[in-house]
Image: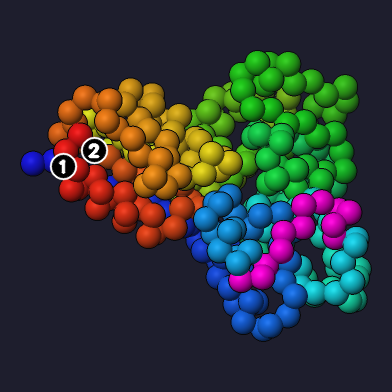
Amino acid sequence: MKEIITAGSAGFCFGVERAVNKVYEEIETGEEIYTYGEIIHNELVVDDLKKKGVRVLKNKEDLEALQKGTVIIRSHGVPREIYELISSRPELRLVDATCPFVSKIHDIVREQSASGRNIVVIGDAAHPEVEGIVSYATTGVKVIKDEKEASECEFDEHREVCVVAQTTFNLAKFQKLVEILRKKSYSIYDVNTVCSATRIRQEEARSIASKVDAMIVIGSRKSSNTGKLYDICRECCAETYLIQTLDDLNLEEAKSFSCVGITAGASTPKFIIEEVQNYVRGTEF
């Protein structure tokens, strides 16, 4: 009989659930609803919101063209300039759905930068969360994602540096990069801003992947935290599959697995996880 181990942490995290619920609540007002960027990185959720009339603002130009309506800031947060622009427009109503853990990083960067420290953000420079974090620095700021970039990281002045992390970054990798920065004679003030939900999810994924024959990771390819889960699982289990929905699951060519693990990113709805579980439980690979 096939054994299935599903991560208890799989699916919506607190910040994602809070953001999505805010949008559905605002839909009930009957007002024109917009989100600045996709509210979360999950196409199914975003498509459902579009069907209910929610429109996505892709950039500053889209925002400036608005005449009225409610603008909801996505869970990843937005650059300071965008937040201030929405706030300055009395004809627009701002609803802030930024994850509280992300907002906390904004506060840390603002305060530490004001005190004169340079800022290092460990994460993906192209990710909307990091774009928002960077915007709160008023001193020197650099974004690094790997050992090479950490080794090359240099500031011309002020050796005091505050280091923060994208909330969904790999915790072990964050700690390794901080150590590289320490060896460069900087006075490091590091704040582990990898959120607790991410840490627990990564630890659980690693534990499950190390004892199963195959691992299924469910989530969008746009999702940073899902990508990190996939990488972690691949390190422990060669037969790791990244899917967004059940339609993507194709294991016909795979060998026979008696034990299958399942985890999911923080933006994956519960019903998709359950569909995959039920399919795996009733399918002989």
Task: Tell me the quarter of the image containing the N terminus.
Answer: top left
**Would you name the residue on which mark 2 appears?**
260
Mark carried by residue 22: none
Q: Nearer the viewer, residue 248 or 152?
A: 248
Under tag 2, what secondary structure? strand
Identify the residue shown where x is 77% and y is 52%: 58
Amino acid type, callout 2: Val
N-terminal of the pair, mark 1 or mark 2, is: 1
Report the span colored magenta.
52-63
Mark carried by residue 3: 1
Horizontal and vertical percent position of residue 52:
61, 71
Identify the residue shown where x is 89% and y is 54%: 61
Identify the residue shown where x is 77% and y is 57%: 57
Count residues near mark 1 (Cα–Cα under 10 Å), then give few for <14, some for 14-19, many for 20+.
some
Task: Tell me the quarter of the image containing the C terminus.
Answer: top left
Under tag 1, what secondary structure? strand
Give the mark count.
Answer: 2
Visible residue check, residue 33: yes
Visible residue check, residue 100: no
In contact (CB < 8 Å): disc 1 and disc 2: yes
